[in-house]
Image (cartoon, rainbow, N blue to C red):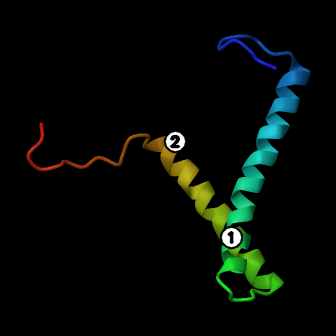
Amino acid sequence: MFFAKEERLSLLVALVMGFQHFLAMCVGLITPPILVGALAGSDLDTRSCTLCVLGGLCVRGVGCGWWEDHPFVVHFHVSNTK
């Protein structure tokens, strides 16, 4: 399905697309800590994997809140440039 940039969506389509986005974000947040733990060869137990996932979720939550308040905070000046 393709929608125009300013097209109004029906409630059902908006709910389905929102749920799909929610699932994609959860997979993107939960999978990396599990893969890194597994590939690091540390044989993490279930509790350690759970703590890694929760830590990733907490960091992402704080990062989203910080980004909303300060959208373009990361500025630096490169010497010899205008």
**Residue 64 percent coordinates (x, y):** 57, 49
What's the mark number on residue 68? 2
**Residue 19 percent coordinates (x, y):** 84, 38
Give whichever of discs 1 and 2 has the lower sequence position: 1
| Structural distance between the alpha carbons of marks 1 and 2 | 24 Å
**Residue 61 percent coordinates (x, y):** 62, 55
**What amino acid is found at the position of numbered circle 1 in the picture?**
Pro
Picture quadrant where residue 15 is located? top right
Quadrant location, the N terminus: top right
Q: Is residue 42 above or below residue 82?
A: below
Q: Which residue is mark 1?
A: 33
Q: Is residue 9 left or right of residue 35?
A: right
Report crowding for label 2: few under 14, some 14 to 19, many 20 or more residues within 10 A (C-alpha): few
Report crowding for label 1: few under 14, some 14 to 19, many 20 or more residues within 10 A (C-alpha): some
Residue at 77% over, 39% down: 21
Quadrant location, the C terminus: top left
